[in-house]
Amino acid sequence: MSASKRSQSTGFEIFNRIFLFMAAAACLLPFIYVAIASITTPEELLVKKVVLIPSQVSFAAYQYIFSTKIIPQSLGVSVFITVFGTLINISMTALMAYPLSRKNLRGRRPLLLMVVFTMLFNGGMIPTYLVVSSLHLLNSFWALWLPTAISAFNLILMRNFFQEIPNELIEAVKIDGGNDWQILINVILPLSLPAIAAFSLFYAVGHWNSFFNAILYIKDADKWPIQVWLRQIVLLSSGGFSDASAMSEVEYIPSVTTQYAVIIFATVPVLMIYPFVQKYFAKGVLVGSVKG
Amino acid sequence: MSKPFGKTSTGILRDMKRDRLLYIMLIPGVLYFLIFKYLPMLGIVISFMDYMPFLGILNSKWVGIKHFVRFFTEPMFFRLFANTLILAFYNLVFFFPLPIILALLLNELSGKFFKRFIQTALYIPHFISWIVVVGISYTMLSPQNGIITEIIKAATGDTVNLLGNSNWFRPLITLQVIWKETGWGTIIFLAALAGVNVELYEAAVIDGANRWQQLVNITLPAIKPTIIVMLILRMGSFLDSGFEQVFLMQNPLNRNVSEVFDTYVYTSGLLNGQFSFSAAVGFFKSLISLILILSVNRAAKKMGEEGLY
């Protein structure tokens, strides 16, 4: 009886391992395929259609990208938007999360309600656009930074994280004559580095990946981030529908390897920081997000 | 110092003076929420006006519910509503249960290193932009040389164009969401699973309960509150239909199924300049979303669950 049960559960375990391995592979394979295709010669792609192992490695697509001037420039724009935007996000969020984490602050509840309500209801795209435009932020990077300066969700999570910090540590600073500013800088932030790291990643990925606000608010093409250019290249110049047939084969195929290479550029920076921050996810995100 | 407020008010004043630095810290955040969240809510009034950019809100003419009447009587209204609801139901039925199932499977995994590798791989798609996801889909499904098109061709002999086929729009959208968000969605359920008391399982094993019985009698009841909270949260964004994704996947060949509230607001409002009309459409959508989340929360509470608040 017990032997058969054990074999039944090892059977399940083997199935489970194989299934999860396949799920993980399904998440990774598209990137590997795109990476391989980006270093294949356009001619080989044209003839074989599908190439899993290129017979000849070619960096022509990458050379082409760097010869365009606009794509390296947009990469720089994306880095600038992301770094500066994340700094704004983290400082604004921490600055608001700390007072809201203090249980005896007068007016804490109405302030929290004000924040939570924005998660349930919003003015919508058009009124928000009109606010941004009436502040004369159109066509400036501030239009990408300010309207998304604080995520209500991240604010609540960060506040919950700050609340977990023992009150004795705060009282100790106060007894030594320290004020709330010093408490935030010297106690709260150093103790919250894992959370800060995780939130920085979330905010940074949000900036790096965002394209719609740029389409909406930025008119000058030389201020576009890489994601907007990727949209132009992939969807407009050689989309998978009827427009593409109007283009000649010769013109179309090289642009396919270019598409692959731009996809890689738009993805790799995120994949590069991700492993360093991944270990903080559990600490940073989960504290407070699950009800006890 | 005589004060008309009485004793508690002076207590408040004293507390506020004590915490004045905290209030100063709150200023930037509160300003942010007022300007970029609450001012647009006030801006909804333009849906009751004929808003002209050069006149501004103060001088534009009030027209009552003209734009709402126009929207509700347009044939487009039903199509938008249906498209949005169908996408939302696809999402709820085919996507929502998957992170729970995947979390349960991950929770059964032994072997720390293997588990970490699997989790790392599963989380990655969440951090990829929708443009990259859509870009990869376009290149793989392209009728010219997409790898999936070639596989289908090898199997059936037909060259299919799934991107230009409106019957495939909803399945493709749902598959993309499943690929991108299932792994990341497990995080919250894994945390809930980690909180389940191990002694319950030990006791169940002694009583002779098998894996399935443990799942039904211990695990699922333990993570039920988390499932319900996630379900309520999903209701709040039920009508959002993943705007960026739908916007990118939309093309002239699938517009009859891909036009949803948000894309319609964008095209009619910002591209065609009908600010007031599309603000009305957006307001209608936000209102329905608010009603949805409040009523689901209330229903959950009636059934004895914790709910959101």
Image (cartoon, coloured by chain):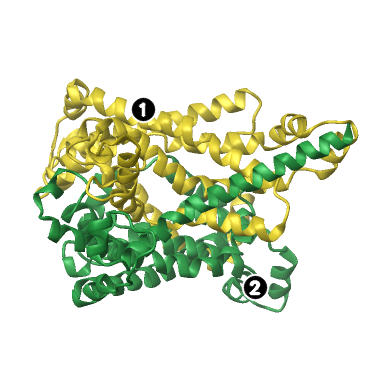
Q: Which of B225 and B114 is in front in this view?
A: B114
Q: Colour of chain B?
A: yellow
- Crowding at mark 2 (Cα within 10 Å: few <14, some 14-19, many 20+): some
Could you say where residue A87 lies in the image, as x and y percent from the top left?
Answer: 43, 71
The x and y percentages for residue B25 are: 50, 66
Which residue is at 62% across, 77% downward? A186
Q: Quadrant of the C terminus of chain B?
A: top right
Q: Is residue B276 left or right of residue B247?
A: left
Quadrant of the frame with the N terminus of chain B: bottom right
- Residue position for label 1: B86
Residue A287: name its quadrant.
bottom right
* Label 1 crowd bin: few (<14), some (14–19), many (20+), radius 10 Å: some
The answer to whether A225 is drawn above or below residue A160 in the figure is below
* Between A153 and B238, the one nearer to me in the picture: B238
Q: Which chain's colour is green?
A: A
Q: Which amino acid does label 1 sit on?
A: Ile
Report whether B199 appears left or right of A36.
right
Q: What element does badge 1 sit on?
A: helix
Rendered image: mark on residue A187:
2
**Above or below for B52 versus A210:** above
